[in-house]
Image (cartoon, helix red, strand yellow):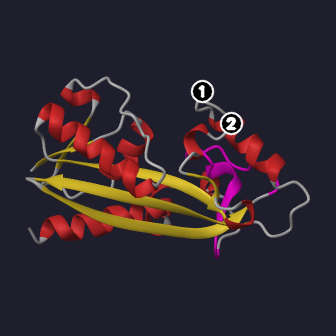
Amino acid sequence: MKLVFATHNENKVKEVKSLLPPNIELLSLNDIGCFDEIPETSPTIEGNAQLKVAYVKANFGLDCFADDTGLEVPVLNNEPGVYSARYAGPQKNSLDNMNKLLTNLKNVTNRDAHFKTVIALAISSEIKFFTGICKGIITFEKKGNLGFGYDPIFQPNNFKQTFAEITLEQKNKIGHRGKAVRLLIDYLSKT
């Protein structure tokens, strides 16, 4: 089965590919010749995932899935949330985003946070949603050089390391995207 993952983010492609069974051939937007920046104008994570799959279906007619992920910090009214990638501005710079979040949490003791990934799957004319959540805390400083995005400042519950200090295999077992992808794989195995 060929399935398009509606993303240009090669880090996400690598994470998801490592979870998929061999009978699913994963293609990225680059692989299908889509170099457009798909607008993410929904106020929700679910809505943005749905916008991406609708774009691929309408313009390429291919079965696909898309994810949208947000880091939500309850003490900050769930910021950065749907704006996680562009929290510090349209340049989508991870270092700037982390620095802004750390500044906004300066002197704050409640550092509870969670990552939320929603996958929208468009097969034929149907859209299904799969959600994965990983709870943890925001650290006081960046630690580790693995992963991407907010990984150096997110420490999952029951771990002493940040996402940027653990292997991709460990992250996929406990992480938000891994949880959502496993739900997706389970659904695909039954169809």
In the rendered image, the quadrant that contains the C terminus is bottom left
Taking the image as shown, residue 31 lies to the left or right of residue 181, namely left
Q: In the image, what residue type sits under mark 2?
A: Ala
Q: Nearer the viewer, residue 79 or 178?
A: 79
Res. 67 visible in picture: no
Residue occupying the point 64% across, 76% down: 158
Q: How many marks?
A: 2
Q: Secondary structure at mark 1?
A: loop
In front of the other: 188 or 108: 108
**Element class at badge 2:** loop
Asked if the residue at tag 2 contacts the one at tag 1, i.e. Cβ–Cβ closer than 8 Å, the answer is yes
| Res 144 seen here | yes
Q: Which quadrant of the figure has residue 35? A: top left
- Is-magenta flag for residue 144? yes
- The x, y position of residue 168, in whole percent, is 48, 54
The boundaries of the magenta stretch are 140-158
Quadrant of residue 121 in the image? bottom left
| As drawn, 56 above or below 132 | above
Q: Which residue is mark 2?
A: 88
In the figure, is residue 108 to the left or right of 153?
right
| Place of residue 32 in the rendered image (x, y in percent of width and height, measured from the top left) | 19, 29
Q: Is residue 82 left or right of residue 104?
A: left
The residue singled out by tag 1 in the image is 91
